[in-house]
Amino acid sequence: MTAYWIAMYRDVTDPDKVAAYAELAGPALKAAGGRFVVRGTPEQVYEAGQELRTVVIEFDSVEAAVAAHDSPEYAAALDALDGGAVRDMRIVPAAE
């Protein structure tokens, strides 16, 4: 079942580290089968919505998304991020 990796950036403390992370993370996640669906800040928010940078990546399954996260290639991206951002990240299965 399709799954979505959803990350929301609550705070960027070091833009250079975020850029270094993105340079490594994008190719690592694409190589693991990820397809970027959303990447940016909201055009409009409602209710308790916050204008947080949001990234949504589609994977073929929860297992594929978890494997991408746990891969050595993505670990290198996390090392580059090194506290440069505070994020809320989750992997969610698609609705049936």
Image (cartoon, rainbow, N blue to C red):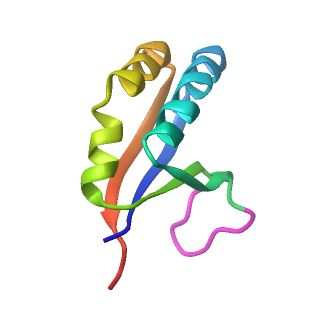
Q: Residue at x 71, y 68 (%)?
A: 44
Q: Residue at x 50, y 54 (%)?
A: 57
Q: Determine if the magenta segment contains residue 46.
A: yes
> Considering only vertical position in the picture, is 96 above or below 75?
below
> Considering only vertical position in the picture, is 15 above or below 69?
above
Left or right: where does residue 13 sit relative to residue 39? Answer: left
Residue 16 quadrant: top right
Indicate the quadrant containing the C terminus: top left, top right, bottom left or bottom right: bottom left
Q: Residue furthest left?
A: 63
Indicate the quadrant containing the N terminus: top left, top right, bottom left or bottom right: bottom left
Which of the pair 17/72 is nearer the observer? 72
* Magenta span main SS: loop
Q: Residue at x 27, y 33 (%)?
A: 70
The picture places residue 4, in percent across and down from the top left corner, at 41, 60
Q: Determine if the magenta segment contains residue 47.
A: yes
The picture places residue 81, in percent across and down from the top left corner, at 48, 19
Left or right: where does residue 83 sit relative to residue 12? Answer: left
The picture places residue 85, in percent across and down from the top left corner, at 50, 27
Residues drawn in magenta: 43-50
Which of the pair 84/78 is nearer the observer? 78
The picture places residue 68, in percent across and down from the top left corner, at 35, 39
Q: Residue at x 55, y 65 (%)?
A: 49
